[in-house]
Image: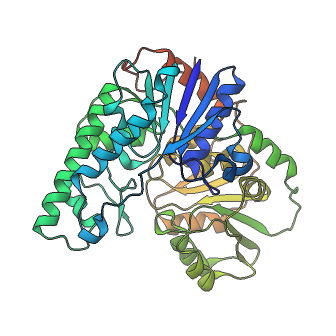
Amino acid sequence: MRILIVSEDIPYPNMGGLAKHALNLSRALIQAGHTVDLLGGDQHPIEVAGEEGQFGGRFFGELNGLHIGWKERKLGMFMPPRRSWLARHFARAILRHARRYDVVHYHGHVPNVARHIPREINFVQTRHDQGSDCVINTRFHNNDICTAVEPAACARCVAARPNTVQTAISSFAVATYRKEVAESFLRHKTVFVSDMLQQNFSRTMGPRRWGTTIHNFVNLEQLRRARASAAPSTAGEAINVFISGKMNPSKGIALFLRTLAPHLPSHMRVIMAGDGPDETSLRAEFESAQVQFLGWCTQEKTLHMAASAHAIVTPSVWEEPSASTILEGLLLGKATFALARGGTPELAMYGAPGQLRLHPDMPSLVRDLVSNNSYGPYAPQPEGLGGAEHAVEKLLRIYQLPPGATLPARLSDR
């Protein structure tokens, strides 16, 4: 098949999980014998992504406009035309290429783009975040999970104390956006990376078959190389706990460190890879011989550190849709600690029994971590599970369905 992968998150020097997902998928599809090109952003040449940006096909850098703010923060309200304009703008770029491909697969933050793609185009999109119904993509407000469904509640995410006019305009903008997204999901094929994402959308827009679930996946070859390079554990050595993630409130790293600090055993070290707005303050508060900050790291170094650790912690307090760091921990055979929220509990199937240690709150997670006497290693799961190649088998079945076909809630493994 001739496949066009589309993502405005590509390319950047430091790419997140969505971009890596799309690139891993591109490589796996090419390895399976298909022709794959990529339509990405015009912000950089593909070379800025280094080795991660090398996927084996052509790159078209044409997408832009995602970060044009329309003065929303200054005005304190979401502007109704902004997201509709962006969807049409992206659709025009996609349609310049679409008819030369058997399928177009979009991975990005503009789900209402599908509303502007003609029905005869074989268009699929994968939803990676909460942006199907949350215009800031996170469902996270004031350091807590947001479950509000009324559009008026969204006004507080752009103004601390929205007035009547700001609330009315933001409410109209959010309601319009959600309506367009719902029309998009009914018009073209939609994949969610967790059941939780589809359930949250149904909570807002009503229960119906909005799409199908194919969990996130990781690069198994990178994991194999990381395992091969990891230093073997020796008796009596310090217990190394590894965290990889953005240093921002939703990732829960600050809460984890503040909860752990009074109970940190002398034989335990916490090593963190990642940067973000909270990095400087967290370094000032916690950096020591036992708490190390590595800053941003390449994917190769991050996986090497994960493979060399005794335990992986993903302390996110928002609803992670399908965290790559948890999948990597499980597939590396590590005891993996997380909060039981979002799509995280769904990922237990990728580990051995008891390997994914889920907790209702941070204090119970920390108690389990510091009192644990065994950190694995756990036996590897069936070959290919959690990898891009396994997901490709399911995606190809979706690609081969007619444009706009209704998808089952979950595809079987056969």
Q: Is residue 140 left or right of residue 287?
A: left
Q: At which x and y percent is residue 51?
A: 74, 47
Residue at coordinates 60% horizontally, 26% vertically from top-left? 392
Residue at coordinates 30% horizontally, 27% vertically from top-left? 186
Q: Closer to the camera, 398 or 199?
A: 398
Q: Is residue 102 left or right of residue 172?
A: right
Residue at coordinates 40% horizontally, 42% vertically from top-left? 197
Is residue 230 visible from the viewing direction of this image?
yes
Residue at coordinates 45% horizontally, 15% vertically from top-left? 401
| Up/down of 69 relative to 228, above or below | below
| Up/down of 122 relative to 198, above or below | above
| Up/down of 287 relative to 40, above or below | below
Furthest-bottom residue in view?
Answer: 284
Q: At which x and y percent is residue 134?
A: 32, 51
Q: Closer to the camera, 182 or 373?
A: 182
Q: Is residue 237 left or right of residue 177?
A: right
Q: Quadrant of residue 266?
A: bottom right
Is residue 385 visible from the viewing direction of this image?
no
Q: At which x and y percent is residue 214?
A: 51, 32
| Up/down of 267 relative to 316, above or below | below
Q: Closer to the camera, 300 or 333?
A: 300
Can you say which quadrant of the picture contains the C terminus? Answer: top right
Q: At which x and y percent is residue 381?
A: 70, 35
